[in-house]
Image (cartoon, rainbow, N blue to C red):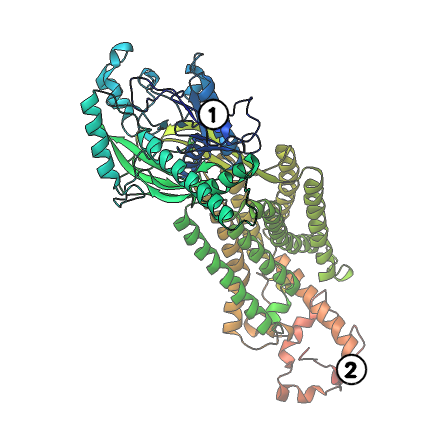
């Protein structure tokens, strides 16, 4: 019932694949079970096609599994194969390609030695090929290459260099470090198995027989030896089963059909499990669950570096493995991101944090003294917008420093439009507030009749709001029509300074759109026009001094500084777009400089004034007089005009509040800090009508204070 056909020759277990041919003859009607100790081809793994086929030797399918495990262990995701153009090797290659695809490993190129492989073989990093002088001819050895070869070569095969164009020394140089994958010929466990011998004792007996007969050894002899024991165990179990059934059968004429015998043999083969000279013998779907040995060629000899347990599907590597480079070779050119330096990012982040703390301090200071006359005269709402804009601009520095080395690609794509919005809105809010305050000064200087044209903060809000609306419309249209996205720009390969056999390809991440240049031209053109108009208004009002708007000088200086630094920043970032560290440094320097200088110029003078005069009431609201300067004619016409306009404004407000205030006799005024008689000359200004012109009796002249 167990059939085998052995073709013997002058060797004991020759390496030829026809040494043991196990088949199912067509003239036999019943199932024939086939056992092989040399057939390793993956074609016989098909259990449906070959349900009664068993093999003692581990198949090439399991060897390919070990190769895949090695690739996964070192995270090699891109490989190439180079094989001989013969049927058996082609079958192994097809099975390996299938397993690599399941393991998500890309086969970059597949070449055969039947054609010239020089064009594509240079791209290989890991290869499965037989011995060849191609390694030395193309200089494909060293730290950038790792070759994985099938095992089973006998002796010092590289000494047969006379058949090739390479010398033996050249082959040894190219072979250094290659890894071989082959099934284990004999078990390393020195325990007595089913035969009563240890693998070492069996090997000694086998070698002694070879010497006596003058024969050549085969790597399959241990599998043939254990195969005999498999047949013995299977037949013994069948015989015992038949005897057991015959003993307890009630019929005297007991017979067992061939079909029943076949099922008994099949069950016995599936239950085989014993320790042989080649290791533990057991089958899974007809396949031998053996151990794959991993060796590496080091200094002229093969050294065992690990093994692959097919039953447990586990790879074990020891510390003896060595690579020609400082680390395992890469499966492709090493890609290195030109990212932002972490120390630089931390320094800039700390500096930006200090600028934001300064903004928060001035915000707290403004809220605390919002009723003070200094704050009321400087457009408080615009001051709040300046603080808000500087904080948004500082936040953009934090976002622009987050690249692919710190965040994921998905987060980076989300940050592209967000940081553009924040920087643009922050700039427009700050510059828009400065522009609005400068525009009001220019309007007051331009219009001589100040009483007829009163500029309120609501009008300034309209100016800033209009700028922000234009900004948001431009950015929204940009993002909807041509959205910003993550792009990767790769540069040419370079030899890494850390190792001579390691190639590095740098790449740079950008936030780009298809028509980025056009959109930037629109945004820069719009903001450039605003800066030009702002500087023009600042120049036209450079000599103006309005008491009610005493921070106009510092507003003009802030506008000049923001304009100059913005031009420097835009130019510098454009010229350094391929150096992210320099680009971020210039951008952060411009933003921090603009924010800190603007905050200091706008709020520090107010802080000094409030410190020197903590009284919340403006002392200029009193009709003060100076006896030493009563009739002085040295004051400029603009100062007189401003003073007269201020007096006129105060008198207008006094007239509106006289109905609510008691009329005080001039006799009591010196006692309450009112106006003395010597100060009446101030009211003789052509802009201020005198008491006689207003037909007011001297006894009813009043001074309203504390407005």
Residue bearing the label numbered 2: 697
Secondary structure category for the residue under label 1? helix
Asked where in the image residue 263 lies, by quadrant, the reply is top right
Assess whether mark 1 and mark 2 are in contact (beta carbons under 8 angstroms).
no
User: Does the image show residue 301?
Assistant: yes
Q: Is residue 6 above or below residue 428?
A: above
Residue bearing the label numbered 1: 93
Residue at position x 36%, y 21% in the image: 130
Q: Is residue 558 left or right of residue 480?
A: left
- 664 or 420: nearer the eye? 420
Of label 2 and label 1, which has the lower sequence position?
A: 1
Alpha carbon separation for disc pair 2 and 1: 120 Å
Q: Is residue 215 above or below residue 660?
A: above
Secondary structure category for the residue under label 2? loop
- 428 or 216: nearer the eye? 216
Asked where in the image residue 305 lies, by quadrant, the reply is top left
Q: Is residue 622 left or right of residue 65?
A: right
Query: In the rendering, at what x and y percent does residue 470 appear?
Result: 71, 46
Q: Quadrant of the C terminus?
A: bottom right
Query: In the rendering, at what x and y percent does residue 124 appear?
Result: 42, 25
Residue at position x 66%, y 80% in the image: 706
Q: Is residue 561 left or right of residue 331?
A: right
């Amino acid at each position: 019932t167990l059939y085998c056909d052995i073709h013997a020759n002058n060797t004991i277990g020759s390496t030829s694949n026809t040494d043991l041919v196990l088949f199912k003859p067509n003239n036999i009607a019943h199932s024939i079970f086939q056992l092989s100790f040399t057939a390793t081809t993956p074609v016989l793994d098909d259990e449906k096609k070959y349900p009664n086929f068993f093999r003692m030797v581990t198949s090439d399918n399991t060897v390919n599994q070990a190769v895949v495990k090695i690739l996964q262990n070192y995270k090699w995701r891109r490989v190439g194969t180079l094989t001989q153009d013969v049927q058996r090797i082609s079958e192994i290659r097809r099975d390996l390609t299938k397993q690599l695809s399941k393991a998500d490993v890309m086969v970059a190129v597949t070449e055969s030695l039947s054609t010239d492989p020089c064009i594509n073989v240079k791209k290989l990093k890991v290869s499965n090929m037989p011995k060849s002088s191609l390694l030395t001819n193309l200089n494909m050895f060293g730290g950038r290459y790792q070759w994985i070869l099938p095992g089973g070569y006998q002796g010092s095969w590289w000494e047969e260099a006379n058949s090739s164009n390479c010398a033996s020394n050249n082959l040894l140089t190219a072979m250094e470090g290659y890894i071989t994958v082959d099934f284990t010929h004999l078990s390393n466990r020195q325990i007595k198995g089913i035969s009563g011998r240890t693998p070492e004792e069996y090997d000694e007996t086998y070698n002694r027989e070879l010497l006596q007969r003058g024969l050549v050894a085969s790597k399959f002899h241990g599998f043939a030896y254990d195969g005999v024991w498999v047949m013995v165990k299977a037949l013994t179990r069948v015989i015992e089963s038949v005897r057991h059934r015959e003993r307890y059968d009630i019929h005297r004429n007991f017979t067992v059909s061939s079909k029943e015998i076949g099922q008994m043999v099949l069950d016995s083969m599936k239950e085989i499990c014993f320790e042989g000279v080649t290791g533990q013998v057991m089958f899974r779907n007809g396949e031998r669950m053996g151990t794959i040995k991993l060796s590496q060629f080091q200094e002229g000899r093969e050294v065992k570096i690990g093994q692959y347990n097919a039953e447990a599907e586990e790879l074990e590597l020891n510390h003896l493995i060595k690579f020609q480079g400082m680390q395992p070779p890469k499966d492709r050119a090493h890609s290195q991101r030109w990212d932002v330096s972490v120390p630089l990012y931390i320094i800039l982040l700390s500096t930006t944090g200090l600028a934001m703390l300064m903004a928060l301090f001035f915000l707290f200071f403004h809220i605390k003294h919002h009723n003070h006359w200094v704050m009321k005269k400087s457009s408080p709402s615009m001051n709040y917008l300046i603080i808000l804009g500087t904080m948004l601009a500082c936040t953009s520095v934090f976002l622009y420093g987050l690249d692919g080395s710190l965040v994921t690609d998905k987060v980076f794509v989300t940050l592209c439009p967000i940081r553009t919005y924040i920087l643009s809105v922050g700039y427009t809010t700050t510059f828009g507030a400065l522009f609005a305050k400068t525009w009001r000064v220019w309007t007051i200087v331009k219009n001589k009749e100040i009483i007829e044209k009163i500029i309120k903060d609501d009008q300034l809000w309209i100016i800033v709001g209009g700028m922000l609306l234009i900004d948001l419309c431009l950015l929204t249209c940009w993002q909807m029509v041509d959205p910003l996205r993550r792009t990767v720009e790769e540069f040419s390969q370079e030899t890494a300074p850390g190792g001579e056999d390691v190639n590095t390809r740098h790449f740079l991440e950008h936030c780009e759109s298809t028509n980025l240049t056009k959109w930037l031209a629109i945004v820069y053109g719009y903001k450039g026009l605003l800066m030009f108009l702002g500087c023009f208004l600042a120049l036209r009002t450079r000599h103006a001094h309005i008491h009610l708007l005493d921070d106009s000088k510092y507003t003009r200086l802030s506008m000049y500084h923001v304009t100059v630094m913005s031009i420097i920043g835009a130019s510098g970032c454009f010229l350094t777009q391929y150096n992210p560290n320099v680009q971020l440094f210039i951008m952060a320097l411009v933003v921090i400089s603009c924010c800190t200088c603007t905050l200091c110029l706008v709020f520090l003078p107010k802080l000094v004034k409030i410190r020197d005069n903590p009284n919340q009431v403006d002392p200029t609201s009193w009709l003060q007089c100076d006896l030493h300067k009563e009739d002085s004619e040295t004051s400029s016409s603009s100062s007189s005009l401003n003073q007269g306009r201020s007096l006129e404004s105060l008198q207008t407000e006094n007239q509106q509040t006289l109905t609510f205030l008691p009329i005080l006799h001039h006799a009591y005024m010196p006692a309450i800090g009112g106006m003395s008689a010597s100060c009446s000359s101030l009211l003789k200004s052509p802009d201020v009508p005198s008491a006689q012109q207003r037909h007011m009796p001297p006894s009813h002249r009043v001074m309203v204070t504390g407005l």
